[in-house]
Image (cartoon, helix red, strand yellow):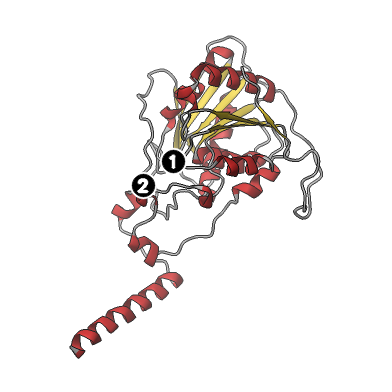
Amino acid sequence: MSSILGLILFLLLLSLVLHVVARVLRVAVADESCQRRPWLPTHWREPIEEGEEVQFQSNDGALLSGTHLRRLTDACRGTIVFSHELNGDRWNALPYVEHLRTEGFDVFTFDYRNHGRSEAQCRWDDAFDVTEADVTDLRAAIRAAASKSSQADPVVGVVGVGKGAAIALCAVGQEPVVRGLLLDSIRPLPEAVDSVQPGYKPTLWLRLFRRRPARAFDVSLAARNVRVPVLFVHGRSDAHVGLDAVRTLASRVVGQCQLWVVPGARHAEAVQVDKDAYRRRSVKFFSHALHTKPVQVRKLEQEPTAPAAHHGRISSAPAQ
């Protein structure tokens, strides 16, 4: 009996030592663990044949894959970059932005690293957090899209869905060519997710023996640096992200801000539930936003106790 207790105590002590060592030293992780992605279903889309395949590099050297889809009109009104959701890929863009091509907008859609045909890297992947790598990838895509534009002074809009919307909110302040954001089913913070599937969390081995990096971006704070028009789209029946969290996030945006709540739509379903209205609103929004100068405000040295009059003014998008 004493030998069994001794063995248990030894194993507990060994686990404690390994845990401490893992917090101090970097421990290699098996390739199999690196290839796993958190469970999150997305609608699979068939790639379209047209479009120019684009290979470009992120600032840290990661090789990314994208597709440039030219407008179906003569005159160019700007370029729309699609920022896909977690576990999605570039082809998830089509229901959201394909119609914009008939309105004179080029479309640039790409795969984030560890997604689609972009480079897969072995790293800690905390599914919901917006990381430096995420923002770096989107900034590289925005620059690649601008380089493909036929406009003398390119203007870019971004459509983001789910985590892709949160990444866009964090990246826009660093790319002056971006003039508007359409953010669908944004997830403000990990704490704002009401329904979390078990597969979202890393394996026990990763959680015990890998150091978790500090969160690179706070989406809520990043909203205070957004000075371009923003259209938030959110399903009233979204069980993953509460509407109150999105309203709070929208109130922090400095620039023009609209919130369109779609009755009967669950997470990322607005484009399916009210397809015609989604198309009308997105065309109207980008037609205005891409030719609106960003709001110029004095940078606050500290967070105010109450928002200023021109901060976070949210208008409910009128029925169309």
**Quadrant housing the N terminus:** bottom left
Query: Upstream in the sequence, badge 1 or badge 2?
Result: 2
Q: Residue furthest bottom?
A: 2
Left or right of residue 220: residue 186: left
Secondary element at tag 2: loop
Q: Nearer the viewer, residue 19 or 245?
A: 245
Residue 112: image quadrant is: top left
Task: Please provide percent x and percent y for residue 179.
Answer: 67, 30
Residue at 41%, 17% (x, y): give it. Answer: 50
Q: Is residue 232 left or right of residue 313?
A: left
> For the residue carrying disc 2, how many other residues have a C-alpha within 10 Å: few (<14), some (14-19), or many (20+)?
some
Give the residue displayed 75% in from the left and 53% down from the top: 303
Q: On residue 270, which mark appears? A: none
- The foreground one among 157 and 199 is 199
Relative height, residue 38 to residue 80 (above, below): below
According to the image, label 1 marks what residue? 86
Amino acid type at image mark 1 = Leu
Name above or below for residue 288 compared with residue 176.
Answer: above
Q: Name the amino acid, label 2.
A: Arg
Residue 71 placement: quadrant: top right
Q: Quarter of the image for the C terminus: give it.
A: top right
Does residue 106 sit above or below 215 in this rendering?
above
Check disc 1: other Cα within 10 Å, few if <14, some if 14-19, many if 20+: many
**Residue at the (46%, 29%) spot, across then down:** 269
Q: Nearer the viewer, residue 8 or 100?
A: 8
- Say whether marks 1 and 2 touch (CB < 8 Å): yes
Q: In what element is the residue under mark 1?
A: loop
Q: Which one is nearer the viewer's eye here, 174 or 279?
A: 279
Could you say where residue 120 lies in the image, as x and y percent from the top left? 38, 45
- Look at mark 2 in the image and give the residue it sits on: 37
Q: CA distance from mark 1 to mark 2?
A: 9 Å
User: In the image, is 30 to the left or to the right of 20?
Assistant: left
